[in-house]
Amino acid sequence: MNRSNVSASFDVVHAILDVVFQCLSMTIVYLVWGHLVKAEQRDSIFAMLFVFIVIYVVCNRAANIYNNTLFFYVDRIIRRKTASFLWATLSCFLVYWFCLDHVIDADFLMAFLTLSYLIVLVESLFFLRLVDRLINRKHIPRCVYVGSKDSYNKFRYFLNKTPLTLNEIGYVSFDDDDDSLEYIGCLSDLEEIIRKYNIDQVYIMQKREMDIAYIQKYIDLCIEMGVTCRVIVDIYRRRKAFSYNSSIGTYPVMTYHTISMNTWESLMKRLFDIIFALIGIILTSSIMIITALAIKFDSKGPAIFKQVRVGKNGRHFKIWKFRSMYADAEERKAELMELNEVQDGMMFKIKDDPRITRVGKFIRKTSIDELPQFFNVLFGSMSFVGTRPPTLDEVEKYTADQWRRISIKPGITGRWQTSGRSNITDFDQVVNLDVDYIDNWNLMMDLKIIFKTVLEIFKRNGSY
């Protein structure tokens, strides 16, 4: 990778301050509550502090806290730092319970965590911008913006939401005169403007209809004069997608995506799935054995039903369920299609389905038929919480916007199951629930859906 691309937006001052403040928290606590610490416990305290700081800083980095172009909405910074703090706290307790054999006084540990979080709040609310301005006040870059007046005002609004400190000299139009106070000239006069106003940086808003060669000559001019040039890419409309900029080697890459999970969050969700799948298998193993025996006694055929379903972005996998229908259920599906209660035939659901066995009615009503899907989750073809896994014939009918609902792993449960389950007969409503989950995903949402799913099972709502 070109060295100019390495951590170009990394706010090293912020990262150093986080480390310093956590060390300060420990120092204060040690001075006040040091009488609780024995001499042989000091090494354990330093080990715990090291683990806490490493996890805290790594989580902050993963949450883009140290990206100095991040919008500086205080509530956003506090929310992300709080999540990092909780992960670091969890790591502390794991070290405390499993590695240090409880050698650190619990009151001392709680005092450190309490003071540490208070300092995190103070740092986020007041200190960061103050330090940034004190450090950079003598070296604030003088910059001009090239574009229209409207885009300049919009860009300046966003700029003021970031930790970046710039001395905005004014804006330069592409070809039009302007009588506003901020207007300082036309792009064709860029060299004279740079000389006259001692410009350090030039921001150019690239228009959708603008020739790249036209922009390139002004980029070359800035490079020739040793002035930093930043091109604001606005040639594609973002619409409903998330976007971010990165680079591969010396090539800038603009990414548009609709999945809210980054790599770190995907890892957390996968760990979440593994833990809950193992817990589910352990807690329900006896129920699964009894269910399998009941199915075998009730009707002919295997206890486990395997069916090819469509997973993430169209991948095929075999879903495992307890068989709740007679062995010839798939063959009889065609003759029952006219009774389908889902609009447009995008899903197949009918009440009092004659293909369901006696045991099948019970295990469907209680959702016991879905317990084998814990193994799907454990092996990675499904997630604990996600979107409903569709069949092959259902996906063949999907429009482009409906395909989006399978852009993540399917789940045992999800928004559809906790919002009426089979009582919902409008497929567009199912899609809207799934898309809302994809757009707003977080671990707390998964926990809420699991809790609501349990309530729905006990209420036995819409589970046919």
Image (tube, helix red, strand yellow):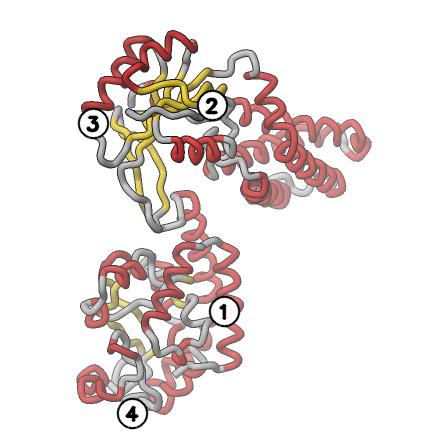
Circle 4: residue type: Pro
Mark 1 and mark 4 in contact? Answer it, CB < 8 Å.
no
> Earlier along the polypeptide chain: callout 1 or callout 3?
3
Question: What residue is disc 1 on?
Answer: 283
In whole angstroms, how far apart are the C-alphas of marks 2 and 1?
Answer: 71 Å
- Residue shown at the point (33%, 18%) measured from the top left: 3
- In screen coordinates, is 333 left or right of 115? left
| Residue 170 location, quadrant | top left
- Camera-near label (3 vs 4) is 3
> Does residue 204 appear in this view?
yes
The residue that label 3 is drawn on is 212
Specify which label sits upstream in the sequence, 2 or 1.
2
Secondary structure beneath disc 1? helix
Which quadrant of the figure has residue 339?
bottom left
Give the SS element for disc 4.
loop
Disc 1 marks which amino acid?
Leu
Q: Is residue 43 left or right of residue 270?
A: right
Point out residue 211 in the picture as x, y percentages from the top left corner: 19, 29
**Mark nearer the viewer, 1 or 4:** 4
Depth check, mark 2 against mark 1: the one in front is 2
Q: Amino acid at mark 3?
A: Ile
The kind of secondary structure element at disc 3 is: helix
Give how far across and how far down residue 66 sits, in percent: 49, 30
